[in-house]
Image (cartoon, helix red, strand yellow):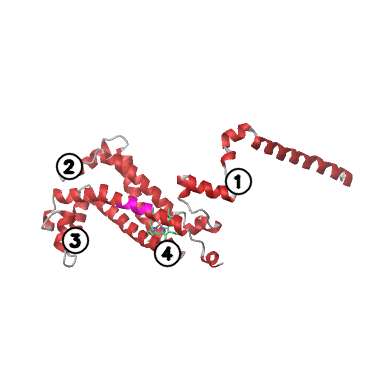
Amino acid sequence: MGAIASPAEDEAMNTIFYGMIDKLVLAMQQLRRSRLWISIFRREHLPQTETDYLAMNRRNFFVHILPAAMNKKSLRTSYSWLWMGVTAFWLFVILVISGIYLMFYYVPSVERAFDTIRYIINQVSLGRFFRNLHKWAGELMVAVVFFHMLRVFYTGAYQKPREFNWIVGVVLFLITIFFAFSGYILPWDQLGYYAAKIACNIAQNVPFVGDQVREGLLGVSNCNNLNQFSLIRWYVIHVFLLPVLIILLIAIHFWRIRKDDFSAPPEEERA
Ligand code: HEM
């Protein structure tokens, strides 16, 4: 039979228990103030006041990309739909790195393009990995950018003061599709060749300036004679023109997010 503790015994137990907790908290506080802890976590550099936070926001390039203040609810992944915009950005970084790797081996020649792709897949070390990474990341980016656009629409974040960024976003979406489409042409296999032919037919049906657009994009006077000019044009579009354009627009997109502040859920924005 266990004896029931008297109130005095209870009191004594409590004193011991809370005394131990107090000592633990004190030890933790001392540890966090110790030179060892500070040398590891550099706490003295962390901002302590709101003014410090704003100063840090201005000083650090990576931090200053973010708005100085954000509504806590907008930080939820459910609000940003798993930070789709951020995901799109990192997919783009993966595409640049894997694309540069592929450029060391790919030759934009109608005779050799397909063979160089086969060479990358079968002979180059890590070639199959980088080629698949590039292909998957490219296709995923189209979906992710689309869902990011859907999220912005769904949360009403396209409204004032973010209308300009919405327009920049629409252009980013079109560029992303152009990226995927131009990449599709580059292996110059049956899929690529006929994709170029479809592009040619669309181009020459542009009202009034169809012939010029076809000449400009594919370098041919007849869509049945796609040739080296057609391939090299889409190669330059894919590895130079679109990357320059998208980097510029992403920079403008991020600058506007910084200036317009990140949106908040509608009920918070109204409050
Ligand atoms: C290459 C494509 C894109 C990239 C890398 C990108 C990146 C981002 C990032 C990182 C954010 C902030 C956080 C987030 O929501 O994840 C954002 C916000 C935003 N994006 Fe994009 N985005 C792209 C395409 C688009 C498209 C297609 C649209 C719309 C047509 C769009 C419109 C917006 C708007 C209006 C915001 C502000 C959202 C808010 O304040 O809630 N973006 N974008």
Point out the tag, 3 or 2, that comes first from the N-terminus.
Answer: 2
Give whichever of 254, 99 is nearer the camera.
Answer: 254
Alpha carbon distance from label 3 to label 2: 26 Å
Write down which quadrant ligand 1 falls in: bottom left
Helix, strand or loop at label 4? It is loop
Does 1 appear above or below 226?
Answer: above
Give whichever of 93, 162 is nearer the camera.
Answer: 162
User: Can you tell me whether the CB of the residue at mark 3 lies under 8 Å from the nearest atom of ligand 1?
Assistant: no
Residue 169 point in image, percent of width and height:
37, 59
Q: Residue at x 85, y 42 (%)?
A: 12
Helix, strand or loop at label 3? It is helix
User: In the image, which residues are magenta?
Assistant: 245-251
Q: Which residue is mark 2?
A: 112
Helix, strand or loop at label 2? It is loop
Tell me the kind of residue under disc 3.
Answer: Ala
Q: Which residue is mark 3?
A: 203
Alpha carbon distance from label 1 to label 2: 61 Å
Point out the tag, 4 or 3, that comes first from the N-terminus.
Answer: 4
Q: Which residue is mark 1?
A: 48
Alpha carbon distance from label 4 to label 3: 31 Å
Residue 246 visible from this viewpoint: yes
Point out the tag, 3 or 1, that comes first from the N-terminus.
Answer: 1
Lateral position of residue 59 relative to residue 140, left or right: right
Lateral position of residue 271 relative to residue 175, left or right: right
Tell me the kind of residue under disc 4.
Answer: Tyr
Q: Which residue is mark 4?
A: 158
Viewer-side label of 4, 3: 4
In which quadrant is the N terminus drawn? top right
Viewer-side label of 1, 2: 1
